[in-house]
Image (spheres, coloured by chain):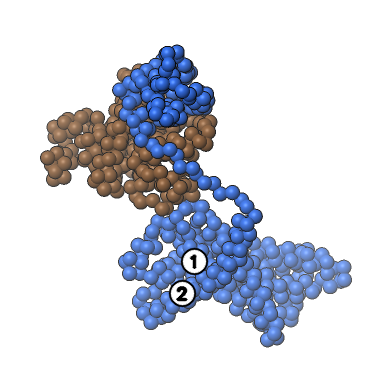
Amino acid sequence: MNGDPKLERIAKGNALALCATGTWTASFAPALERLVADAEKLAGSSQSIFIDVSEVAKLDTFGAWLIERLRRSLTQGAVEAQIAGLSANYSSLVDEVRRVRATAVVETSTITISGMLEQIGRTVAGIGGTIAGLIDMLGAVLAAGAHVLIHPRSFRLTSTVHHMEQVCWRAVPIIVLITFLIGCIIAQQGIFHFRRFGADIFVVDMLGVLVLREIGVLLVAIMVAGRSGSAYTAELGSMKMREEIDALRTMGFDPIEVLVLPRMLALVLALPILAFLGAMAALYGGGLVAWLYGGVDPEAFLLRLRDAISIDHFIVGIVKAPVMAAVIGIVACVEGLAVQGSAESLGQHTTASVVKGIFFVIVMDGVFAIFFASIGM
Amino acid sequence: MAGDIQNPIIRVRDITVQFGATRVLDGLDLDVKRGEILGFVGPSGAGKSVLTRTIIGLVPKVAGSIEVFGVDLDSSNTSQRRNVERRWGVLFQQGALFSSLTVRQNIQFPMREYLRVSQRLMDEITMAKLAMVGLKPEVAERFPSELSGGMIKRVALARALSLDPDLVFLDEPTSGLDPIGAGDFDELVRTLQRTLGLTVFMVTHDLDSLYTACDRIAVLGNGKIIAAGSIADMQASQHPWLRQYFHGKRARAVMS
């Protein structure tokens, strides 16, 4: 019953007659397209044109369309090609296909130099938009915060505690582990190089200043941007996609107050705690390496640390933490709320959230460095 | 066509599906015959979608066997399974269109994967499928997020039909459509079944669909098929849920 499809010309006097046989289905589509393309060349000055499909064993949409395509291209001027011998089973399929209009040409975008320049221009112009968006979100969050201060009952304690658990409590193991390792590495490198000058003990100074002032908070902020910033963007983005945020709005809730404020608050509280824990873990790791590798015993380490480090170093580090948390949170929420309907868009904005979050954290760190240097801390 | 008329296209024997301690399907048997439109009804939460998803292999079963096109899906190898998958189409309840592809790319996705046809033919077939499901050609370049609920259903059906399958699973195809749209949809399913020799497995709550589109109806309750037969059999049944379903206020309105 099945068979390779064929399309044969039968002599019929002045008329052009084509006889289709075999299986005209999707699996044979490439062969069918070639058959039809060959037959299309036969269009000429025949008085009448027939396509006989009575011998077709099986027909599906692909086959029916190709027969229709052939019929259309053979139809020239006043001579209309006819389909003959159509079985009742397939006539409605062919009728269905006949109603299809000729395909609109699908325009494909080509890459041109002017297009690329335009893209660069748009991206640069977009930077201003990004900054405006961040400031807008900062304002909205502060306004929501002020509203909550005036109406404390509208504060979402459960949500805030939930997010605290997610971004703070659950982050402790990984943050402590990584900062511990970084502390170890700094101490090892310091000892290895300082030993040549017989200045082993100064590794404590370096470790203390670096960890408490810079590395501790910067490293923790970068990890939080990757860990929690991305989560915020993905959460808000998928809520946006499923119209959950619109639903909130129609019920008279402010999405900023319900969704963004608890997340921001959790992050701003969590980052100083994590930065403190991270600094302690790094100092502990550094101390351990100094003792086991450098021969600086713990008592000497602590004594030296007390001399080398003032409380100012710790304050300089920890003051930065909430500001960096706010930057990460705002970037993540802006990106989350900017997600459009597709999965691709969600991925793009989550990436952007982490990249921009880390970028702004480092920029903020530089600004703080200049600030503290000029006030002499 | 492969296989004879007597052999059911889907043969489900004694399947059990369990989520934790809850047994959703409990030793269920079901046959779907070639060329029929089977309407599948049952109370909400009875496991209609679970059965559909079990047959197409998305939900693991605890016991039992499933044969589709005469191929046992548990003992089949990858190429047999792919061959079966190529011959069925699935319309998910929410459409499940790929959100980052346009309508045209969504419909062409299975063609690109399984057939070696020219871009021109794919574009033309896409237009034909869109016309078949009652959509305008302009829709082709839109993204799923720019479509209405009814359009999403139609595009999803067009995608399910893109390889001209022998069997389609429709999970609540008319829910969320206006009555005229739903009626058109039933008509469409009927037409496609006639023209393409399609077998349709349709989970539905729409009484109109049951009356106008379905050849046979199966009813799910307590993890088993509690009744299967024509609409007349269903009306004659004394089962309390069936009596309520087919003799309730809405059913009377549909029948009159």
Chain letter belonging to callout 1:
A
Judge by depth and name the residue closer to the eye, B84 or B191.
B191
Q: Do the residues under discs 2 and 1 have CB atoms within 8 angstroms?
A: yes
Give the residue type at disc 1: Cys
Mark 2 secondary-structure assignment: helix
**Mark carried by residue A141:** 2
Q: Residue furthest bottom?
A: A375
Residue B167 lies left or right of residue A277; in this view the side is left
Residue A94 pos. (x, y %): 36, 29
Judge by depth and name the residue closer to the eye, A129 or B252.
A129
* Mark 2 and mark 1: Cα distance apart in space: 10 Å
Mark 1 — residue?
A333
Residue visible at 50% across and 55% down in the picture:
A345
Give the residue type at disc 2: Val
Residue visible at 19% across and 32% down in the picture:
B231
The chain letter corresponding to blue is: A
* Shown colour of chain B: brown
Same-chain status of marks 2 and 1: yes
Residue A362 lies left or right of residue B236; in this view the side is right
Residue A336 lies left or right of residue B253; in this view the side is right
Give the crowd class for mark 1: few <14, some 14-19, many >=20 residues within 10 Å. Answer: many
Residue B47 pos. (x, y %): 31, 41
Mark 1 secondary-structure assignment: helix
Reply above or below: A247 against B90.
below
